[in-house]
Amino acid sequence: MHPGARFQNRGFHCLVSGCYKVHKNGALPPKPTSIEHCCLMTEGNSWDILVNCRPNTNQCKREKNWKNVMEVYPDAKVERKHNNIELTLPVLTENLEVAAFGVPKKSDQKRMQMAVFGKDPTQGCNWKIRVYLIDDSKRHLRLFARKKQKKETDC
């Protein structure tokens, strides 16, 4: 992981994970947070992935007030795994929201998956389906399916 200075000066960066809430832990030992991302991490791909944080308040959600977690918490441990990042924070005094942001190189790729929704087909009739392309992570698929299910029950 790189300190935030390079991140600020680079052009294109994108959210490559869901947003994870981390609650203040008082004097308890910190529990690692596993942040699943959708960057393709095979040979030939060399994403710069940074973990950023912001206070978890409604006010901050309107602002894009993200800061590099290593600048805010120098004692944080950020361990990059294959498809996730393990973040261990020191003792927190406020609730946080954390997420991974990626800075792709020219030939880097994202892992994506296709979600197909539709009613059961009936014989001899046209079959209407909706196809969506979403980030390839269990968290994104769960959130997307939940939204689609809620939307269909509201209709």
Image: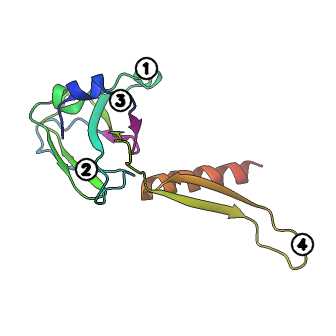
Q: Residues within 10 Å of mark 4 (few under 14, many from 20)?
A: few
Q: Amino acid at mark 4?
A: Cys
As drawn, the label of residue 63 is 1
**In front: label 3 or label 1:** 1
As drawn, the label of residue 85 is 2
How far apart are labels 2 and 4 at the CA level?
Answer: 47 Å
Residue at the (39%, 44%) spot, across then down: 16
**In front: label 3 or label 2:** 2
As drawn, the label of residue 125 is 4
Mark 3 element type: loop
Give the residue number, with chain letter if any, for mark 3.
Answer: 56
Which span is picked out in magenta? 13-21
Task: Choose top left, top right, bottom left or bottom right for residue 55.
Answer: top left
Q: Pointer 1 and pointer 4: residues touching (CB < 8 Å)?
A: no
How far apart are labels 1 and 4 at the CA level?
Answer: 48 Å
Question: Horizontal and vertical percent for residue 101?
Answer: 34, 38
